[in-house]
Amino acid sequence: EGKHSFHTLVIVLVLIVSDSHPLPSDGCGKNTTLARNIPVLMTLPVNDSTLVNPYRNYYIFLPNSYNASEPTTLVFFFHGYYETAQGVMQDDKLMQKSASLEKGFILVHPQGEFDCGTRNCAKPYEQATWNVFGTASSPGPLGATCDPNRTFWGSYPCYLSCRSKAIGGCKDNCWSSTCANDTLFFETLLDHMEDNFCINKSNIFVTGMSNGGMMAYGMAVQFPQRLAGAVPVAGSALIGFWSPPSFPIAVMDIHGTSDNTIPANITNSFQYPRFLHPGAAVSDDGFYYVPNTNITSDIAKVNGCDFSGWRDWPNFWSGIAGLSCGFPYGTCTYAPDSVCMAWKARVAVSRN
């Protein structure tokens, strides 16, 4: 239930950032025959040289309130590591939230690739992943993104897309995801949505959990001028691959302070202080993550925050399961105040 509640905070950011002067997309005025108030599975061609099958899947949810002549808020949700779009749709409750609003938002759940490199990528669970922030690029500028000796930690397969001619194979033991160009997939999907549906281009948001939270951060960095905000849940970046956005963007960071699957900070690394790596939080599978305070403070600088200190943000969830909410970097000039949230719990979706 906690996971469901945290994702309703996406709606909070939508309301905070909501633009009273909508910017209509090229899709305004184009009618659609898509069903309302139910998720619809769609396919989209993507010009990605790493894939044998150039088509990518996603689910789209149009609320009953959708009108092809009224610019509508758009929200993307990225599923976690070894999860599926269909599975998280039932968990995140965002469809129900959209349907309950007088003016609901369009919801899109993109699907990560299943090319896990083994005979059956659906057993013992769906092995879908996202390629973001170094998950398929080690070694990076700061060296390997994990402990390359996998005897203690266990190993990940080299995904089929990583064996393609375009990539040439996994370079070390830290490659843990597909090599599909997921940034290109998102950009293609965003273009498609704007071209075919009446989108408020001033009100487009990304969110996701775990590996999907990494995608939310990644897309915020890549497309800050096309997105109004991001709500990464238990997201981060592998060391050597983080860089801040080039343009201000609203961010609501949500992370569990006891999470060591994608640790929020060095001191909640797996079995801390047994496993240490310079400048990194060490996960329970031996990967090296950028501490979240480094990420959020970098974004705060871009957003023109004055770093005048923490301000509490009281809300319904304050104090529940140790949840604390606030504005950690004072008042921000170029975007709504960056909000950090933390709760004393492990992330609900494991990487392993």
Image (cartoon, helix red, strand yellow):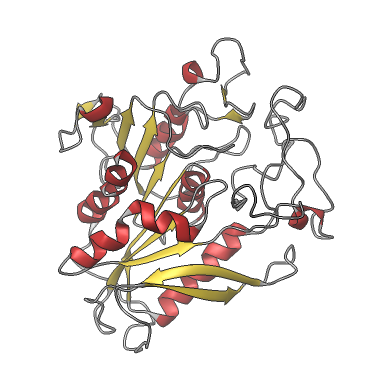
In this orientation, which residue lies closer to the viewer: 117 or 105?
117
Quarter of the image where one finds residue 142: top right
For the point 31% across and 76% down, the residue is: 24
- Where 202 sits versus 335, above or below? below
Quarter of the image where one finds residue 95: bottom left
Left or right of 339, for residue 89: right
For the point 53% across and 51% down, the residue is: 83
Left or right of 284, for residue 171: right
Q: Quadrant of the N terminus?
A: top left
- Where 256 sits versus 88, above or below? above
Task: Tell me residue 320's x, y (percent).
Answer: 22, 30
Left or right of 53, for residue 30: left
Q: Can residue 224 be seen at all in this image of the molecule?
A: no
Quarter of the image where one finds residue 173: top right
Task: Tell me residue 143's x, y (percent).
Answer: 73, 30
Task: Tell me residue 310's x, y (percent).
Answer: 25, 25
Q: Residue furthest top?
A: 273
Task: Tell me residue 69's x, y (percent).
Answer: 26, 84
Number of marks in the rendered image: 0
